[in-house]
Amino acid sequence: MNYDINVAPDELARLVVQAAENAAAQGYWTGAAPIAQDALHHLTRFLGLLLAGDDDINRRELTVYSQALRGASGVDASHEDLRAAAMETMEMANDPDALHAFLGETPRYLRAIVAMDRERGTRNAGQVVTALSGLGVAMLTADGREAEEEDSIFTTHLNHLRGELDVHGVTTD
């Protein structure tokens, strides 16, 4: 696969969190924890899988991961903390049932955004999935190598999320 991206990872991650916070502010979030925490958790896991999907973590990948998580959380993490977070996701990657469940799961924050879009006729969910796609592309291209495992994770999860938007009548256009 050949990828190109023109928006910085921190901006894309910030868009994801802002859309989630908008849905919460409009009353579409029912979770006990803040919706931004749910979005950050999803970003950490999704990008962590792409980061460590080829069993190698290099500095350029860690930089993209750091930028994205800083954009989502507003906090700078050390490369050691980022590496540890990515390695935690590898536990999930090594458990086929857990990996399959994650790839086929719609995060709760995105379900809240979809509910808001359906009711209000907005297109925030499509923008979030597009931002997630851009973040995935940034991660996939950071090391300059193509790994089938990473492409599979990217494609499977994004196709699921796009399908979820279609089921609910919310498009990415």
Image (cartoon, rainbow, N blue to C red):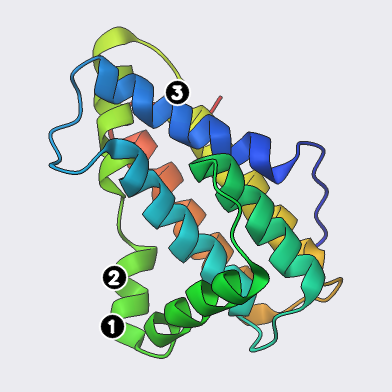
Horizontal and vertical percent for residue 134?
Answer: 66, 45
**Which of these two is toward me, 81 or 59?**
81
Can residue 152 be seen at all in this image of the molecule? no
The image quadrant of residue 20 is top left
Of label 1 and label 3, which has the lower sequence position?
A: 1
21 vs 141: above or below: above
Residue at x 55% of width, y 72% of height: 81
Horizontal and vertical percent for residue 100?
Answer: 34, 75
What amino acid is found at the position of numbered circle 3 in the picture?
Asn
From the viewer's perspective, is 141 left or right of 129?
right
* Residue indicated by mark 2: 101
Kindly report the distance in space between the C-alpha atoms of the residues bearing marks 1 and 2: 6 Å
Tag 2 secondary structure? helix
Are the residues flagged by discs 2 and 3 in contact, CB closer than 8 Å? no
Kindly report the distance in space between the C-alpha atoms of the residues bearing marks 1 and 3: 30 Å
Residue at x 79% of width, y 73% of height: 59
99 vs 1: above or below: below
What amino acid is found at the position of numbered circle 1 in the picture?
Asp
The image quadrant of residue 168 is top left
- Report the disc number at residue 124: 3
Question: The C terminus appears in which quarter of the rendering?
Answer: top right
Residue at x 31% of width, y 50% of height: 106
Horizontal and vertical percent for residue 158?
Answer: 50, 53
- Report the disc number at residue 97: 1
Are the residues flagged by discs 1 and 2 in contact, CB closer than 8 Å? yes
